[in-house]
Every structure is written in structure tokens, then in C-alpha cells.
Image (cartoon, rainbow, N blue to C red):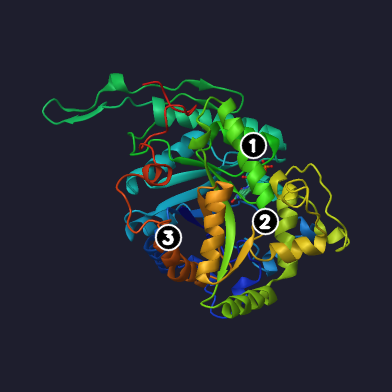
Amino acid sequence: MRLNLFTMNAVEHVSMGSWRYPGDQSARYTDRTYWEEVARTAERGGFDAVFFADVRGIYDVYGGSRETAIEKAVQTPSNDPTYLIPAMASVTNHLGFAVTRSTSYNHPYQLAREFSTLDHLTDGRVAFNVVTSYLESAAANLGVEERLDHDARYDRAQEFMDVCYALWEDSWDEGSVVRDRDAGVYTRPEGVHDVDHEGEFFSVRGPHGCEPSPQRTPVVYQAGSSDRGREFAARNAEAVFVSLPTERGVRDYVEDMRSRAADHGRDPDSLAFFPGVVPVVGETEALAEAKYESYREAIDVEGVLAVLSGFMDLDLSTLDPDERVEHIETEAIQGAVDAFTTSDPDRDWTVREVAQFAGLGTTSPVVVGTPEAVADELERWFTDVGVDGFNVKEVTRPDSLRDFVDLVVPELRERGLVRDRYGDGTLRERTLGYGPRLPADHPGRSDD
Ligand SMILES: Cc1cc2nc3c(=O)[nH]c(=O)nc-3n(C[C@H](O)[C@H](O)[C@H](O)COP(=O)(O)O)c2cc1C
């Protein structure tokens, strides 16, 4: 069973109001030592990676204003996660780092260089969570007059990835860096190639400026769940972060994605699935329930509505709380709308129910109980639903992670489900079980 910690370099991430909870340390997000502690704890728990969400705008859809987001620290203020990685890598040896970066507001040449640098500095422990972004406010920040429409963002994302693959995989031949002191040849020039990309969105001549890093292409994560998002994931993702509230939704999603991967000529079993989960654990059932109740009391409902309004690009302040959430086609995160509409035909949600559910972890299920009960539920998902692991979402920080590592991980280890010690190699080898490079059937892999 693979484990990632899902977090954000911000005060509030997915459990709005939790910064007020007694003992919560979310406000230490600006402190390097906080993140070093997180890294050490995650590695102690055998985690594969710390997975960082990131956005470049403000949640200003709710009530047509950014006021709630600012007041309640709804993913604002937030700092760039990329720069935490060298600090966290330097206090760990095996833990990986998945960083969310947007293909809508970056340039592939620059991003490829950043990831190659991180892959070198971490000895191959980085992953790229490819997102297309959803906040109109981000477009306004990045010199783009209007957010590209939903499907056009995915067209740009595919071209972006094709440029990155060319830079990472094809630009420098294996063995071209010879470091021959006697001959005075560091790199054989004939082994380094332009990529000569001329497309709709990008023009990149190349060659890549970095020599090949341990993984070359970082492990590719993706989380889109619209039809177009799934197609993109089926072609590009090695691991998928799925965040849906019910088991039925996750089951259908996994089945659909495996069949789409096969349509792209890939081994359907090579795609790894990480549903989000919000564990709330206590030494006894009563303690777990009491913790859950106190967490629920701390939920800031306005904050929840502000984040969801941003996810959905739908101002939830305009709806009656007892109104059923209707399916809409959104320009933002289609998957967040689907989560409470089409993903499970057996379940209807009112706005009030969505706000209550989403207070802890937004669109993922909460699992409350003793270490044994939580482990039972995760084991059931692992064996019956066929997922590969979990993106563990936090309520309070750092206690949610500590509780999980100190209480649930020993139980999972006892059952032989979570590693006692790490194997050698890169993040790709440890998490996905194949070599350090993209597998041969991945469309981004060169034919060398
Ligand atoms: C579980 C989940 C997590 C996501 N995390 C982020 C994120 O951290 N930053 C971001 O800009 N987009 C994030 N997204 C947005 C999507 O990855 C995607 O680029 C976009 O919103 C379109 O998604 P769709 O195909 O579901 O409509 C996330 C989406 C999901 C479903």
C-alpha cells in the first residue's frame, strides 16, 4: 500500500477552519523547520511522498468577492511549494515529493529545467502533478486576459507535456556525458539534440539545458476527472489522484481509467490510483468519535463554501442550502461538480450536505475509528476496490499526520501492507515498481 501526504504550503488547504483548532500549527507553514518535521514524520511512516497542491489565484467566486477567502485563509496566503523540496529532501533519504504545477501558466522549457534540477538534487525523488488550473483569478495574475476554456487548457497541457518529454527523454542521449578529463570532453556534442518544437502554443528549439537526471521525466501524476481530463490522464499519467466522496464513484473511475489507458496502448495495470482519504483516528472508538465531533465543530462553513465555489466556478452563496446540487458543465474542476452529482448515481446531495461533508477534506471520504478500524477500511479499499494507495488528507496539522503515522501505520505494517524499510532507487522504482525511467509503453518515452 502506497501512501502520500496531501498538503499545501498554505494555512488552510482542504479542512477549512482547522487553523483555529487547539494545538494546530498550520500558521507555521512559512517556517522551514515545520516542513522538515513533516518530512521526517512522513518518512518514519514509510510514506512514498509528500504531495503538494498549489494554486496561483484567490478564491473569489463565493459571494463574488475574495473577502471570505482572505479572512478565513482559504488557500491564501500560500507560498510556492517547489522551494520546500530541497529543505525537506536534505533531512530525508527516501521520501518523494510530488509538486503541483500548472501547464496553463508556465512555460515547458522553464518547468523542465526546474524539475530536472530537483530530480538531481533529490537523487530522483520528484513527481510532477500536472494540472491545468481552474481559477479565473489566476489568469488575471499571469497576464492572461481570460482563462483558456476547459478543453483548450487540456490541448495546451498535451503540447506542454510533449515538449517536456522531448527535453527530458530525447534531447540528451544516454552516455553522452563522458566527463573525460584527458580528452577535455565533458559531453559529446553529437549526443545532444535540438527538440525543434513548433506548435500551437509553444516554440522551443532546445536542446535541454540540463544533463539527464536519475528519472529524467519526474513521476507523472494527474487529477483531472472530466472526460477530457481522463483522456489526458490515460495518455500521460503514471499515477492518478482521485478525489470522490463514495466508493462507487472511485470504483467506476478506476475501471474507466484502466480501459482508457489500454486504448492508448498502455498496460492498464501500470496506472496507479491514489484516492484521497481523511483518516480520523483515536486509541479507542470513543476517542475517535470525540475527535471527529470536535473537528466537525471547528469547521468554518463559509470557508468551505468559498473553496468549493472556486473548485466549481459556481457561487454557492446564491443557492438555497436545501437545494439539490445539479450537474453543470463547469469551466473549473469538472471533477468537483461530478463528485456531488454524476459520480455516484445512488447518491443525491443538497448544498447543506455538501458543505457539511466537505468541511473535512473537501471531496474525499472521512474514515473514523480505532487504528484497527481505519486499517480495515484502507485494506478493504486496497484489496476490493483495487486502488494502489492513498493521498492522506489532513484535518489538523501536524496532528493528523502524526496520528496516522503513530497509530495506523504500525497496524498496516503488522498486516504487511506498508513497508518497514525503503528499497533502493528512485521514487518511480519505489512507488510504481518499475525502472527509474518512464516505462517503454508510455507515450512520452523515446525509442532509444
Ligand atoms: C483531486 C484534485 C486535486 C486537484 N488539485 C489541484 C491543485 O492543487 N492545483 C490546481 O491548480 N488544480 C488542481 N486540480 C485541478 C485539475 O487537476 C485540473 O487541472 C482542472 O481543474 C480540470 O479538471 P477536470 O478534468 O476535473 O475538469 C485538482 C483536481 C482534482 C480532482
Residue 106 image point, x, y percent: 55, 40
Q: Is mark 2 within 8 Å of ligand 1?
A: yes
- The answer to whether residue 198 is above or below residue 235 is above
Mark found first going from the N terminus, 1 or 3: 1
Which residue matches tag 1?
Answer: 256
Residue situated furthest left in the rendering? 182
**Residue drawn at point x = 52 percent, y = 73 percent:** 25
Residue 346 image point, x, y percent: 78, 51
Say what amino acid the circle numbered 1 marks: Asp
Which residue matches tag 3?
Answer: 415
From mark 2 to mark 1, how far is it between C-alphas? 19 Å
Residue 351 image point, x, y percent: 81, 60
- The answer to whether residue 29 is above or below residue 433 is below
141 or 323, which is in the foreground?
A: 323
Q: Mark 3: which secondary structure? A: loop
Label 2, residues with CA under 10 Å away: few <14, some 14-19, many ≥20: many
For the residues carrying marks 3 and 2, which lies nearer the camera in this image? Answer: 3
Say what amino acid the circle numbered 3 marks: Arg
262 or 176, which is in the foreground?
A: 262
Quarter of image, res 95 = bottom left
Q: Are marks 1 and 3 in contact (CB under 8 Å)?
A: no
351 or 2, which is in the foreground?
A: 2
Asked whether, in this view, residue 24 is left or right of residue 36, the answer is right
Residue 201 image point, x, y percent: 60, 28
Which residue matches tag 2?
Answer: 363
From mark 3 to mark 2, how far is it between C-alphas? 28 Å
